[in-house]
Image (cartoon, grey):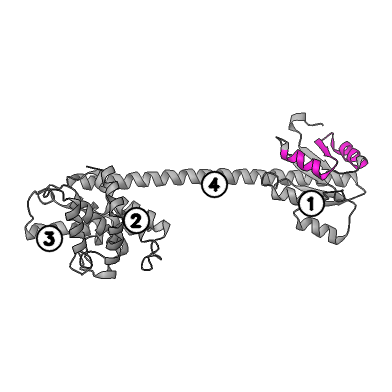
């Protein structure tokens, strides 16, 4: 039974001999739509201009100007054509000829004189193989796009959740979501500045900088557990109240650990967020809290966060203080070099403070 003309597979026959084109066309025309080209040049022109690519190419080898091997090379170099199966149809029958054809990417090799049953069987097999390959390729492309879409959705949900959690903590401290945006951006900018520094190069990969940016908003998540009469006190805290305030670092770490436990496995950004929440109040000389870590004992993530957080606190108005001008802020930051802050990090920060100020002006409270 003949197929509907619109459903027929398209076969391109390339041969410089009219008799061969006539013979092959007559053998295939009842089952397939046959296109012919009597030279390699015309074949390539057709392939480059046609809107509907053929499903199979039958290719002679011995042709003038461009032989079959040359044509096959051109086909395989073109991303739009390289998945079309190519079958050599030729009088060249040596093992070396066949090996060269397969090495160049041919799918099959039929020698002349042509046997009609063999030609029809080989053509049918190649078209069936192509149909399977196309199906698998289309399915893989669909799955890759679906995975990409779902990954984007997960990342978007993750980012919104982090920001919402961090905002909840900040609003209890009379600060704004802009504090989160500023400090996260400062951390990212400082990390980028230090990316080629010998001391930090191995750690500050592009992936880690992205993780730092996503983790930074959770640095004060533990403030959710601090009582209002301490967190919102306009005056100076008593020693007892300050000890309670200091627990926000531990509370933050424990909250993130609880989230990790619920997930059942470690997530990179939560690991980094835990470092930042727990250690961003440590000082380079060991006088910080909660553990009194010193120098390189303090995680790099927390050292970056410390600079960003202190700078923003000095430049911003709080319930217990007014904002400081840039000159005073920079003076205090410089005084903390090597005592409060990692000296290499602070030097890098001071080199980009004008860029930091641009960010601050874009996210004012």
- Per the model, the C-alpha gap separating discs 2 and 4 is 27 Å
- Mark nearer the N terminus (3 vs 4): 4
Is residue 260 at all visible to an observer of this figure? no
* Dot 1 alpha-carbon crowd within 10 angstroms: few under 14, some 14 to 19, many 20 or more: some
Label 1 residue SS: helix
The magenta segment: 19-48
Q: Can you identify the residue that label 2 sits on? A: 212
- Per the model, the C-alpha gap separating discs 1 and 2 is 53 Å
- Per the model, the C-alpha gap separating discs 3 and 4 is 52 Å
- Per the model, the C-alpha gap separating discs 2 and 3 is 28 Å
Q: Can you identify the residue that label 4 sits on? A: 144
- Mark nearer the N terminus (4 vs 1): 1
Disc assigned to residue 70: 1
- Mark nearer the N terminus (2 vs 3): 2
- Per the model, the C-alpha gap separating discs 3 and 1 is 80 Å
The quarter of the picture where the C terminus appears is top left
- Give the residue displayed 21% in from the left and 62% down from the top: 334
Residue 26 highlighted magenta (yes or no): yes
Is residue 118 at all visible to an observer of this figure? yes
- Give the residue displayed 23% in from the left and 45% down from the top: 168
Q: Can you identify the residue that label 3 sits on? A: 243
* Image quarter of residue 291: bottom left
């Amino acid at each position: 039974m003949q197929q509907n003309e619109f459903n027929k597979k398209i076969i391109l026959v390339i041969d410089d001999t009219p008799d061969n084109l006539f013979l092959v066309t007559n053998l295939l025309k009842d089952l397939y739509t046959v296109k012919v080209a009597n030279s390699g040049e015309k074949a390539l022109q057709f392939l480059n201009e046609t809107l509907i690519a053929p499903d199979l190419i039958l290719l002679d080898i011995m042709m003038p100007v461009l032989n079959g091997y040359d044509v096959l090379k051109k086909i395989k170099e073109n991303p739009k054509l390289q998945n079309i199966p190519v079958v050599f149809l030729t009088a060249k029958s040596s093992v070396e000829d066949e090996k060269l054809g397969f090495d160049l990417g041919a799918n099959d090799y039929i020698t002349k004189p042509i046997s009609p049953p063999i030609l029809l069987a080989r053509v049918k097999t190649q078209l069936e193989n192509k149909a399977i390959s196309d199906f698998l390729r289309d399915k893989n492309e669909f799955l890759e796009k679906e995975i990409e879409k779902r990954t984007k959705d997960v990342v978007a949900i993750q980012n919104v959740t982090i920001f919402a959690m961090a905002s909840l903590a900040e609003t209890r401290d009379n600060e704004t979501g802009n504090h989160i945006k500023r400090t996260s951006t400062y951390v990212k900018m400082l990390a980028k500045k230090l990316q080629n520094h010998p001391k930090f190069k191995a750690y500050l990969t592009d992936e880690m900088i992205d993780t730092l940016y996503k983790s930074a908003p959770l640095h004060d998540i533990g403030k959710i557990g601090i009582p209002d009469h301490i967190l919102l006190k306009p005056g100076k805290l008593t020693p007892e109240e300050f000890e309670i305030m200091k627990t926000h670092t531990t509370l933050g770490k424990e909250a993130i650990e609880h989230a990790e436990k619920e997930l059942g496995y470690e997530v990179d950004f939560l690991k980094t967020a835990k470092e930042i929440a727990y250690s961003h109040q440590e000082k380079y000389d060991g006088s910080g809290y909660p553990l009194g870590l010193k120098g390189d004992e303090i995680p790099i993530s927390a050292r970056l966060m410390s600079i960003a957080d202190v700078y923003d606190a000095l430049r911003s108005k709080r319930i217990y203080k007014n904002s400081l001008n840039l000159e005073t802020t920079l003076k205090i930051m410089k005084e903390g070099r090597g005592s409060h802050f990692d000296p290499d990090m602070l030097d890098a920060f001071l080199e980009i403070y004008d860029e930091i100020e641009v960010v601050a002006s874009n996210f004012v409270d």
